[in-house]
Amino acid sequence: MKPLVWVFVEQEEGKVHPVSWELLGKAGELAQELDGVAEALVLGHQVESVAREAISYGADKVYLIDDPVLQYYRNEPYAQGVINLCKKYKPEILLLGATPVGRDLAGSIATSLETGLTADVTGLEIDPKSKNLIMTRPAFGGNIMASIICPNHRPQMSTVRPRTFPLPTKDPSRQAEIIREELGLREEEIRVKRVDFIPKDKVVNLEYAEVIVAGGRGLGKAQGFSLLKELAQLLGGEVGASRAAVDAGWIDYEYQVGQTGKTVRPKVYLALGISGAIQHRVGMQNADFIIAVNTDPKAPIFRIADLGLVGDLYQILPPLIEAIKKERGHGKA
């Protein structure tokens, strides 16, 4: 039997988290190296459309468990569904997004199956000799990159950061088999009940922002981020930060880009006062266009920048902001 590379498709009310499609694209590459197949797991209620969408994003087969018990995410029924599928079909690899749901679910699955789990992965590749999955992730506070293998247990499991891999091209004409399976759990058997749900507005959506205006130690002070926020708002983007700026207490952790923060793939990334240490670069180097401003002409960020400006950001940004406002008819601030 060919090796199976599985992706858990995370969805809420039929809306799929983009990381699932990113992982399906990567699963196809891994499956090709293993001479295997990339397949998707879809759990939920009235989610057959999600299963068909998974096929369009590259799944060679979809395992669908559609049950009212799975109408919303709870660890117990979702974990049991995936565990049963793993025991029945014995996948070689199982990938989940490093999201709150993915992280919660993966631990339960790995514990039950007595296999290894590498969390918050930023790189996946197949070892050409052993054919084991090499899972790369930051360690020791982001100071090193650890390559981890799971040679003796299956499936090899990872939770992978959103935006680590590109979104594959959707092909609605693709055809593949949908295998329907039963959950085998009744609502009265589930120990956790959802009484109510209070949604929390997400303050920042860095992973999927098309424009990011990021600041680092070169800002010199927390107040510098007010200038970045103004520019980001004009450009329809989000504010980001280096670890140094977050550690200094100038901005919250949710804005951090890098090995110990978020991985991003914007169309434009402005690195302002960021030296460009490797820990930061690995989180943003796949941006389509990188603009860097730094007073140090030898700053590492200039090695990957498409456009570099050597100078004081406080002399560069205010005229830039005014020029954008004028161009858009906002008048003088």
Image (cartoon, helix red, strand yellow):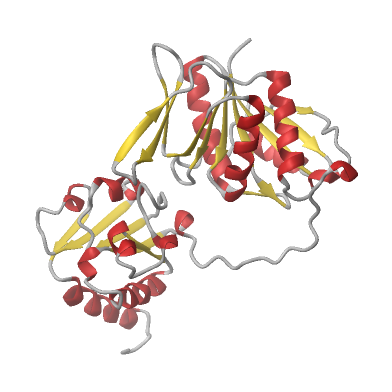
In the depicted structure, whether residue 246 falls above or below residue 150? below
| Nearer to me, 86 or 296 | 86
Q: Is residue 206 left or right of residue 143?
A: right
Of all residues, the one furthest to the bottom in this rendering is 332
Q: Quadrant of residue 240?
A: bottom left
Q: Is residue 241 left or right of residue 89?
A: left
Residue at left 68%, top 33%? 41
Q: Position of residue 213 (x, y in %)?
A: 34, 65
Residue at left 82%, top 33%? 183
Residue 214 shows in this picture: no
Residue at left 47%, top 44%? 161
Residue 70 shows in this picture: yes
Of all residues, the one furthest to the left in this rendering is 297
| Nearer to me, 270 or 193 | 193
Q: Position of residue 329 (x, y in %)?
A: 37, 84
Q: Position of residue 102 (x, y in %)?
A: 59, 43
Q: Is residue 170 left or right of residue 265?
A: right
Quadrant into which the C terminus falls: bottom left
In the depicted structure, whether residue 122 falls above or below residue 304? above
Residue at left 22%, top 52%? 276
Q: Quadrant of residue 307?
A: bottom left
In the depicted structure, whether residue 138 falls above or below residue 308? above
Quadrant into which the N terminus falls: top right
How many numbered discs sit on the rendered protein?
0
| Nearer to me, 260 or 21 | 260
In the depicted structure, whether residue 45 falls above or below residue 252? above
| Nearer to me, 127 or 32 | 127
